[in-house]
Amino acid sequence: MRNPRVLVLHAAKDLFVQVGRATASLRPRAEIVHCMAVDLMPALIADHGSFDVVIAGPIASTDEGLFALRHLRVQSPTTNVILAFDRWRSGTLRNTVRTGALDLLRLPVDDDVILNAVEEALSIGWPAHDCAPAVDAKARPDGRVIVVGSATGGCGKTFYSTNLAYYLRAHLDKRTILIDLDLQFGELSTALRLKPRHTISDLVAMDDRDEAFALRLEECAVSHESGVFVLAAPDAPAEADALDANDIARVIAAASSRFDFVVVDTPAALSEGVLSAIEKAERIFSIATLDLPSVRNLGVLLTTLNQLKVPSERIQLVLNKVEHDVGMDVSTVVRYFPQGFSSVIPYGREVNRSLNMGMPMLAFAPRSEVSRALIAGFAASIEQGDEEPVAPRGRRGRRLISRR
């Protein structure tokens, strides 16, 4: 196992000496190299080769210094950057984010803080150097993109998205990522009780090249205990305005290059970003509930998608929260949608409990009627590919799905 390599970018030698002292306990011992100026860094790297970690001092806090670090990350995606500044310059916040730095230390700093930061940076980036060469990402087929949406709010699209992602990960053993495209009021991280450090806005702000961007996507995503990754919506609704359709398309393309399945949870709107996701989707699950406004809006949505030339075979209809004696029954709704419903999911009180526990329904109550309906629908729509959906049956054995 080779020695990890750390570059300290600082005008004076004090930080270089401290990093050497703080990391003395690392085994194998780290090789520490000092660089006294930003403009000398490219030549030094050319002479010495790439570094596992770069600790950048205050001389890199200027716009030119931050741009140099950003360029370094593009050229060497396996190099992790740690910023060690003595003061915060608010005017350079955007450029600071774009460096893709792993950590930000405030000088003066204790030795143990430096050691912890370096250890974390090495644990993320360094082992890859000692492993067998990775398979070329371009040789790997792109992951399958699935969009989940609804023309009406409150239909359970987030519930459906989280359970679909869990099914793909736990039942099919596929690497799966959930992308929250409800940019103003996304609920995925809340529904799974996650506290993401980064959001889709942070990812887009980094503005790396394609390969580095895909790597950064995994760093910005947070992992649920089930193994599903989640890329959260922005923290504030105002941040949604900074994301356009090209940004969304780039995020989805990066996700499909790294994961087997990309599940996109969308808002009840056909924004440019949502249309960008639909364009890339292999499957589009459109969810409605057993009430007149939802059923009517489902019809409007299907008409709109048809006008947009979205192939009808990509679209799967889902009827959620089905109850008896609500003034409308399933057979009435089916008559208006001859393509049928891939799933008819009953109402279940345990659904809210699973959401409050931050667990998908399939994990919380796998034997419940709701879970059985979900699994049957997923198996018919995902595993059987383009085959016709299996018609689920109600409690009395009635056929609820019409076939084309």
Image (cartoon, rainbow, N blue to C red):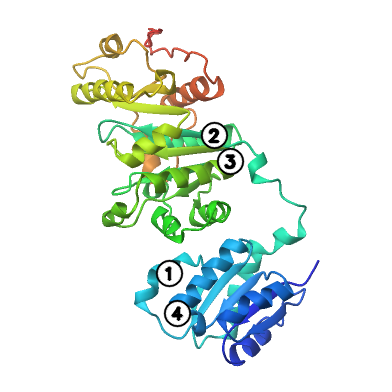
Residue 95's disc number:
1
* Residue 341 falls in image quadrant: top left
Distance CA(mark 3)–CA(mark 4)? 39 Å
Q: Please state which amino acid type lies under the numbered disc 4.
A: Thr
Labels 2 and 4: the sequence-earlier one: 4
Crowding near the residue tagged with mark 3, few <14, some 14–19, many ≥20 C-alpha atoms within 10 Å: some
Name the quarter where the C terminus is drawn: top left
Q: Position of residue 81 (x, y in %)?
A: 57, 71
Q: Residue at x 48, y 73 (%)?
A: 66
**Separation of disc 2 and disc 4 at Cα?**
45 Å
Q: Which residue is mark 4?
A: 62
Considering the numbered disc 3 on the image, is that residue within a helix, a strand or a loop? loop
Please tell me which of labels 3 and 1 falls first in the chain: 1
Q: Amino acid at mark 2?
A: Leu
Give the residue number, with chain letter if any, for mark 2.
Answer: 168
Q: Amino acid at mark 3?
A: Arg
For disc 1, the neighbor class at 10 Å (few under 14, some 14 to 19, many from 20) is: many
Query: Which is in the foreground here, disc 1 or disc 2?
Result: 1
Q: Number of numbered discs present? A: 4
Residue 343 percent coordinates (x, y): 41, 20
Provide the secondary structure element on which disc 2 rests: helix
Instruction: State whether residue 113 appears in this view.
Output: no
